[in-house]
Amino acid sequence: MNVTLCLTHDCNLRCAYCYAGVKSARRMSWETAKRALDFSFEQSLNRARFSGHEPESQLGFFGGEPLLEWDLLRRSAAYADEEAARLGIALKKTVTTNMALLDGQKAEWFRANHFYLGLSLDGNAAMHDTLRRFPDGRGSHAECAKALAYFRGPEARAEVIVVVDPRNVIGLADSVEWLMEQGVCNIALNPNFYTEWAEPAQETWRESYERIGGLYADRFRRNAPVRVNVFDGKIRVWLKEGYAACDKCGFGVDEIAVAPSGRLYPCERIVGDDTNAELCMGNVYDGFDKERRACVVACRGNTVEECAECSVRDRCMNWCSCINYATTGATDRVAGIVCFHERLAINAADRVASALFAERNPAFLAKFYNAARIG
C-alpha cells in the first residue's frame, strides 16, 4: 500500500495553478499521522498475505507545503521506519516540496534517511516566477533555486518537477536547458491539465518539446544522458509494447492519500480542500467506507470508446483517474487536451529514439537496451 500524508493545507507560496485548494492553517495532528501509518501498514500486510509477495509500502509527504510541518514530518518518518522494520515491510519514503524552506541541514537529513525528493521548480527565473510567487506577489525563484546545489548530478535522489502551463510554456525549452546546465539529471515535465490550452499555446508546447528533444539527444551524444520523463517514459513503454498493469496508478486500490483531517482519498491530487464527498473513501480511524471505495475503484480508468481504436492507446496515459477527474469531472473519461499531450509526447520521444538508435549511440543503447545484443 502506498500512502501519502498531506500534512497541512497551508503553504508559503501562492502558485497560480495550485490544485491543492484554499490555503488554511489546518494541519495533521500526530495522532492522525500515527493512525494513518498504522492503517497503511495493516493494508500492506493484508495485501502481502493475499498476493503471496513480500510486504512493501511507499510513504509520501505532501501538502500544502510539508516542510512547514518539519517536526511532524520527522516524527512520522522515524515512526514509519521503526514500525516497518518491526513488521518486515520494505519501506520507501518520498517528499514533494516547493524548495523555499529546503536548506543544507534539511537536505542532509533527507539523504541520511533515504528519502527521494520531488522538487517543484519551474526552471529558470523567467518561467518559474510567472506563476510561482509568495503571498505578497514576489517571485520565489531566488529562494527556491538555492536548494538545487544539494541535488546535482546523476546520483541525486531527486527529480525537479516543472509544471507546464499555457501562461509559462513560452519559457519551457529555455528552462529545461537551464536546469541541465545546473547539473539537474532528472526532470519531470508535468502539464497543467486543469486549465484551458488555446491553439497558440499548444503550438508553443509542440515547438518546445521538439527543442527539448534536441537537448535530450545532445546529452546522449555527449555521453552525459539525463532523464526527462516525457521521453524516457514513452521510449520505455514502446520497448515494453505498452503500459503494464503495474505501471498504472493504484487509484484507491493500493494507493491512498490522507487529508490532515484523516479522511481517505484515492490520490493526493484529489484531496484539495478535503470536501469531496464523492471521492472520500473513509478515514484512518474507522477504515474504508467499503461501498464508497468500491464505487471509486469501479469508475477508474477510461471508458471513451474512441480510445479503443487509437493506434497509440497502449502508450497513452488515458487511464490516469485523477487527471481524468480534473479535466472532465469523471475518473473514467479522458479529455482532449490529454490526448493532444500524449500524442505530442509519443511523437517527440519516437523522433529522438529513432535518431539515437540509428546512430547506435552507446549511451542510448546502454540505457534502454542490452547494448551487448545490439548489432
Image (cartoon, rainbow, N blue to C red):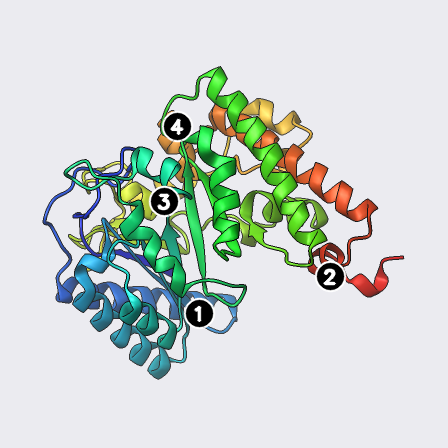
Residue carrying label 3 = 294
Residue 286: quadrant of the picture? bottom left
Q: Quadrant of residue 308?
A: top right
Provide the secondary structure element on which disc 4 rests: helix
Residue at point 19%, 55% (across, down): 262
Pointer 1 residue: 56
Sequence order check: which comes first, mark 1 or mark 2? 1
Residue 290 seen in the current view: no
**Amino acid type, callout 4:** Thr
Which residue of the protein is positioned furthest toward the bottom in this rendering? 86
For image coordinates 54% across by 30% down, the residue present is 341
Percent position of residue 68, x then y: 18, 57
Tell me which label, 4 or 3, sits earlier in the chain.
3
Real-space Cα distance between discs 2 and 3?
A: 43 Å
Which tag, 1 or 3, sits closer to the chain's start?
1
- Marks 2, 4: nearer the viewer: 2
Separation (CA) of disc 2 from disc 4: 38 Å
What residue did someone put label 4 on?
A: 327
- Mark pair 1, 2: CA separation: 29 Å
Residue occupying image coordinates x 76% and y 57%: 365
Residue 184 at x, y percent in the picture: 49, 56
Whole-angstrom CA distance, mark 1 to mark 4, is: 32 Å
Residue type at tag 3: Ala
Residue neighbourhood size for the residue with mark 4, other residues' Cα within 10 Å, grouped as few (<14), some (14–19), many (≥20): many
Identity of the amino acid at label 2? Ala
Task: Judge the density around disc 3: few (<14), some (14-19), many (≥20) Cα neighbours within 10 Å.
Answer: some
Secondary element type, mark 1: strand
Q: Secondary structure at mark 3?
A: helix
